[in-house]
Amino acid sequence: MAFRQIFLSLKKSKLLLLLLAVFFVKQLFMVAIFPMFQGPDEPVHYATIQNSANRLLDISQKKASNVISTEDMADKNNDKKNYPKYSEEISNVYNLVGVSRVSFHSRSTQIFSSGMNGKNEDEVKNNNWKKGGGKDIVADLPGYYFFPSCIEKILSKCNIFIRFFGTRIFSIFLGILIILFSYLSAKKIGFDDNISILLTALIGFQPIFSQSAAITNYDIMLVFAFSLFIFGSIWILKNGLNWKNISLLIFSIFLGIFTKAPAIVLPIVFYFLMAYFIKNHYKINTKKIVIGFIVTTLFLILSVKFLFPNNYFASTIPDINSSRLVSINKYISTTMDRWDWSELSYWGNFGWLDTAISSWIVNLAHWIEIAGILGIIAYFFFPKKVPEFLPKKKYIWFLIGIFLGLQFAIRFADWNHFNNTGKIEIGTPGRYFIPVIFAQFSLIVIGIGMLARKYSVWKNILKILALGMIMLWIYSVLIIIIPRYYL
Amino acid sequence: MKYLKLNYILIFLFLIFIGIIFCKFFNTLTFSDSSLNFEGDGGKQEKLYPNAQIIQKITATENNLNQIDISINKFSADFGEKIVLEIADENCGETIAQSKIDAFTWNSPGYEKLRFKTIPDSKDKTYCLKITYIPFGKEQDKKAYISSYPNEGSSYINTGKSIEEQKNRTLKLKPAYENGSNWQNFSELSDRMSQYKPDYLKGIYLKTLFILSFIFIMLLVVAVIFV
């Protein structure tokens, strides 16, 4: 039903098709804008892709020759600590392209020559350097790396520019799917076609989401996993459980967990969702379901903690003692100053967080967010005055739940690291919060709808916001990113 | 009818804002000398004393010199104060061009871009740059700094400190040049963007992608306004 709905939506909504086409073209342009390895952590992600591609290559060769390579032996013995950071190819390209000259140096660019070819381009193209053999950024999390490593493998005869930018283009396709599922989620939640398109346009032109969907980084797969999960959850909330939506949810949870740690939020939200479903389906009263929920939760936490002490999930469950509480206090006072930095990097601090938009834009976005929050508060305080065109309460609780869940998970991981090292090392750059962009923007849209009261006023405000977001994207590209890297 | 009017107003406003962004974009298309490298050891901060000049000579490597990018640190311009750049002839006599940055044109944390009237035949000519910080009212004690780096053959004088020449050092500044027309500037930008890119994102493909992106976006804007 829902999969058919995807194709029906495309057929029905020409506007959606136009939006997807525009998204593809402008993202392709964005792929070209960022110089090589200037996306956050791009060299290490690409190094991991190369290693994964090598493993794919090894598997096919081993099948043919039944021989185990020395690198494979090293893998087996977990002897990776002596590996260089990058492969020979990435290290050489890194130096020849002048990556370190640009990253974190907002007043420095590559050295340009006259004409279309860089000074060292021929040397980079015509080499026989070893691909792969560097360190992986994450071990055993193939969620994102599988498809880019297939691209790397298929294009293995081509030069590194074709291969590397090929993996960036893969991110565009994930971005398109995210846009599509955002539109479908908006429709399922109860927005009409026009509002769904406006909301989807807001997401599609958000500058940091656009950057994520144009670089080589596993963040975009995490956003995709969250988008699938949100769509599946809304489907369950609307139509109840069926094998299709439950499979989608389980798939998205596994995809997320095999991509990046913040996906731990997904099984937790799933757990709440199931409790809600059991309560409604079996008509159990609230008292019983709350007690049952608490007992089951404690049982699950203790089981994970004591039966599997070395498990990743167990390591994230802290021992509560006084020193930890002091540490939480210290952490909160240390990170309060970083709030603005997170906000700025959510709305537009590009590359290696050295290319920021003007702060007044962030302040303006702040006011719009505040208006949305006020509207959501009004929604709960004045239930009789909720306009009919707004979604039902259960969807709003779900969106708030997943939004806060990710906030909590990221800050918890940041604190956990702070607690162990005494330093803020992971931090909370804005792009970490992009996976719940649909929830955040939907809540703002609903909040504004509550304040607007009339459908036509609401729609016009959303049009203005969508145009504002398109302008923000154009401004970011033409006035911020291009001058930073090329002038 | 009212509704239609609002849609046209939105299109009109959007076109104005986009026009402003594009004007600013084409206006910023001036190309600094990317070969100048100021990283490494030996860097120090040179203080800009209020109303006193820092003077350095530079030789232009291209024609159409129209901007000097200066790295100014620990400072952001408040209302009324400004940093003035004068470009004089080789003997630091006659002023050829002038530029200033103030609270409205401040660009931190990147280079401050001091734009002036294009000097068409600048290639291989030496110019004398005079940089002055002009404070406003009580802000006399405010500090502004320019980084300086070792560089064989360059020198500058910080007249606020002494008239002694700082030999074999250069201020952190880059001359920038434009081309004859907006299209030529756009082509040079396209050339720079094409470097270290795959063939399918180079040259004519890149230019087409650039133009196509904005045509498509305009189509979407019209569609969004009339939903």
Image (cartoon, coloured by chain):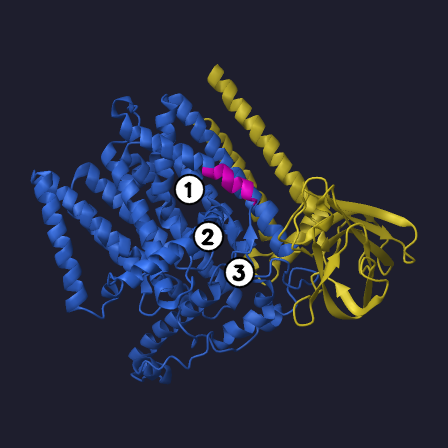
Chain colours: A blue, B yellow
Horizontally, residue A448 falls left or right of residue B85, namely left
Label 1 vs 2, first from the N-terminus: 1
Sequence-earlier tag: 2 or 3: 3
Identify the amino acid type marked 3: Gln
Q: Position of residue A85 (x, y in %)?
A: 46, 75
Query: Considering depth in this image, is B182 or A329 the residue closer to the camera?
Result: A329
Q: Which residue has dot 2 on it? A: A338
- Which residue does the numbered mark 3 point to in the structure image? A38
Amino acid type, label 1: Ile
Place of residue A46 in the rendered image (x, y in percent of width and height, measured from the top left): 45, 66
Is B17 contained in the magenta span?
no
Q: Residue at x 56, y 48 (%)?
A: B209
Quick one: SS at disc 2? loop
Q: Residue beneath label 1, please? A: A203
Q: Is residue A109 shown above or below A58?
A: above
- Marks 1/3 in contact by CB < 8 Å: the verdict is no
Q: Are dots 2 and 3 on a single chain?
A: yes
Instruction: Name the side, left or right, on which B142 lies relative to B225.
Output: right
Residue at mark 1 to residue at mark 2: CA–CA distance: 24 Å
Q: Specify the subunit that label 3 lies on.
A: A
Q: CA distance from mark 1 to mark 3?
A: 23 Å
Quarter residue A14 falls in: top left
Report which quarter residue B175 is drawn in: bottom right
Callout 1 crowding tier (Cα within 10 Å): few <14, some 14–19, many ≥20: many
- Pointer 3: residues within 10 angstroms few (<14), some, or many (20+)? many
